[in-house]
Amino acid sequence: MPRSPEGIPRCARSRLFMRVPMEQSTDRQVTVTVRSRTTDAANDLARQVREQTTLFRFTDRLFRARTVVEIYECALDAICETLMCSRASILRFDDGGTMRFVAWRGLSDGYRAAVDGHSPWKRHDREADPIFLSDVALSKEPRQLIETIIGEGIHALAFIPLAGADELAGKFMVYYDTPRVFTDHERDLALLVARQLGFALERHAGDASARRLTALVESSDDAIIAKDLNGLITDWNPGAERLFGYRREEMLGQPVMLLIPEDRRGEEPTILERIRAGERIEHYETIRRRKDGTPVAISLTVSPIKDARGEIVGASKIARDISERQRAQEQQQLLLHEMNHRVKNVFALTSGIVNLTARSATTPAELASTVSERLATLSRAHALTMSSIAAESEPAATTLHPLIAAILAPYRAGERSRCEVRGADIPIPSTLVTSISLLLHEFATNAAKYGSLSTMDGMVEITCSKRLSEFVIVWRERGGPSPRSAGGEGFGSRLVKATASQLGRVSRVWDPLGVVIELVIERDRLEA
């Protein structure tokens, strides 16, 4: 075999030289492959860093956002950066359940007007899946809609639902100028952004609702109190401070029993039992106790408080002060009873006037004339019992003696007066005319029905005198039937006591000659 000068066979030498270039070529391929993989890994790492940075910034901006506009803006930034698009939009359901644009990037007014209201889902579709259209021209959407989308220069898009806790809040959309194959990673990114955005919108709505609720609670005139199932107070609004007199810091953590009088302690366990059963207690009227120990009448509404899992963890109480309402109702009842009493008295007095007049009248004409005159006098005396507030003009000043004479004028026996008034005559303030007239009218009415004015010969002696810091009116009946104490206290007696308490006090004695009534008026009342 021929050999080379180096002593190597020529054929072997040829193979050797040929082998060297082949090994060098393989090394270059390996180097290119390694460099390519290194570049891909570096690109993947850079992409991951970019995405993580974008998502972190998105989360931070959502946390700091104070308005829904700020939420939309940072969401659109995150959508465009993570999904590599220049156009995007956010749509929400309006009150009528129609999907409307609320924020967008790179969309014309005409396009938004043309597709506004279009949505593949309804509000109740909480489990809606995202929709990715890689090529709009090949989609199954209506032809007119496809032409509108392509006319906007959009050839690929995605619908990403925004799910809330109970229903679908809306969607966001991404748009691309060319057909696009969406990777699994892009789908995952889109869902991640959607979850963050949906949560932020729900939190904002919840915060806004909570702020409105807090404002309502804080500004309410009613006492609004929250307690746990052990009866310990967990919240206390300004209305409760005004009603019960305790400051918020005094009551938090305290038992609600602090507000309940001893004779009402049995109510609280019953209320808690009903609350644990999920029952709502409506307009329960009861009595509670203020910080100073005074009772207050309230109307109570109690509702269960539930946590996020729907479990009952406490109760809210709304207490409304009904003291004024009860006083108004009592006053109304008093007025109704008084009206009924006075109407009955009018009929009794009219009957008595007719009977007394009939004993002395000689002709029907005389009877009719005398009865009419006495009824007219009775009407004028009755007008004196009307409140001066109800008068069309300021009443003229009056003194005690003329007032007594006017009230007893209907009980004259012909030309003979049936009352004698002696003693001091003092001016009567307009604020006391009603009260004094009511009392004197009540005394006269009882005398006409049961006492001295029920007979022709009966008389009433009235003595007025000053005594230290008091003014005393003594009413003595003479010449009537034997006086007797009533078996029970009627409305007339209660009316007398209630009216007299506004002036001073009243007492009644059944003397053998006739009833004696002493009305004591405090002097400072007469000077008011």
Image (cartoon, rainbow, N blue to C red):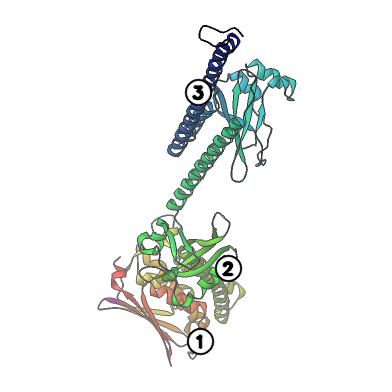
Q: Quadrant of residue 130?
A: top right
> Callout 2, which amino acid?
Arg
On the image, numbered disc 2 is attached to which residue? Answer: 274
Q: Is residue 164 magenta?
A: no
Label number found at residue 39: 3
In space, the residues marked 2 and 1 are separated at their CA atoms by 49 Å
Q: Quadrant of residue 136?
A: top right
Pointer 2 or 3: first along the chain: 3
Span highlighted in magenta in the image: 464-470
| Residue 356 x, y percent position in the rendering | 55, 80
Circle 2: is it few (<14), some (14-19), or many (20+) Cα within 10 Å? some
| Towards the viewer: 340 or 368 | 340
Q: Pointer 2 and pointer 3: residues touching (CB < 8 Å)?
A: no
Q: Is residue 375 left or right of residue 57?
A: right
Of circles 2 and 1, which is in front? 2
Magenta stretch, main secondary structure, is strand
Pointer 1 or 3: first along the chain: 3
